[in-house]
Amino acid sequence: MKCLVVGHVVRDVIRRGSKIEERLGGGAYYSALALSRFCDVEILTSFSQLPEEWIDELRSLGKLTVLPSDETTSYELTYLDSNRRELRLISRASPITEFPAQKYDAIILNPVANEIPEDIVREALNRAGLVSADLQGFIRSPEKGPVRLIERDGSFLRGVGILHADVAEFPHVNLDPGSVGVLLLSDGPNPGKAYLHGRPYRFVPLKVDVGESTGAGDVFLGAFTGFYMECPFIQSLKRAVAFTALFLRYRSVDFSLDEVSELARGVTVEALSD
């Protein structure tokens, strides 16, 4: 299978107490990392400069297409605890305004700084049988400084096969859960909600003792997309929760899918009344 991930890759500056670390990040990177376990991945992004070893890591996931830009998107992430953080946009690469003229089995749209225009969303819907999107980057202001969420009319997302959002983000978009195929609302380590064609479900993340949760939501989206191409909804949801827990444990996706399936047996997913 052939899959495309669209969005900025990021130079993350991570602060935890007195420790400062720079590393490769961004929703597109983490979703591609997960999705690479299921299909041949292409990454469509834009940046100016990144360390060569980071570029090599991106290329190890699949084909890398970089649109020209004068800057590279960079965020400062200051962790208050393992799940709470403050974000500040330091720099922003050019918007992604070009799209490959070919078909894909699945496309993930995962912006981090409002870099994917609405016409690219419409183009994606014509290019793949399954289109997934993460809301976060569509509702972030592109202005430098502390991250500020903006209100948006979500009509441009109607018809998307899978939409992921944090529970605190979803109220910023005017969108009925039934207007997308699957809506995934996560709340860090707390129980989340999922909707299948508007029907609500509750899922419970597995407990993992971690120092940070960077990339968890993006891996969750990538893993769910991969499983959902071949598995029913509830099975995909359970396995995506288990996949994300293992990623948080290892900070890697170098584990077997048999281990994911075994761990998924302990994941709780239950239908809720409408």
Image (tube, helix red, strand yellow):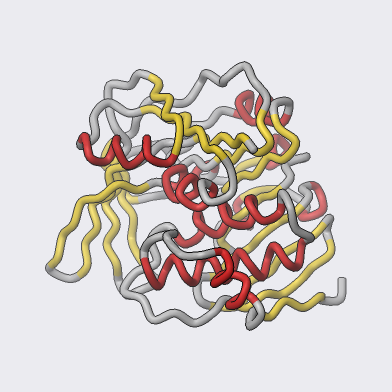
Viewer-proximal residue among 108 and 114: 108
Q: What residue appears at the point 59 percent right and 49 percent down from the top-left corner?
A: 38
Horizontal side of residue 18 vs 214, given as left or right: left
Total tally of numbered discs in the picture: 0
**What residue is drawn where x is 47% and y is 33%?**
43
Residue 259 or residue 221, whichever sits in front: 259
The answer to whether 157 appears left or right of 167 in the picture is right
Answer above or below: position of 104 versus 197: above
Q: Is residue 145 visible?
A: no
Compared with residue 172, is residue 258 higher up or lower down, i.e. above or below?
below
Residue sitting farthest toward the left: 18
Residue 23 pos. (x, y %): 25, 50
The quarter in which the N terminus is drawn is top right
Q: Residue at x 54, y 72 (%)?
A: 259
Give percent across and percent down for residue 83.
Answer: 40, 71
Which quarter of the figure has residue 51?
top left
The spot of residue 29 in percent (x, y) is 42, 45
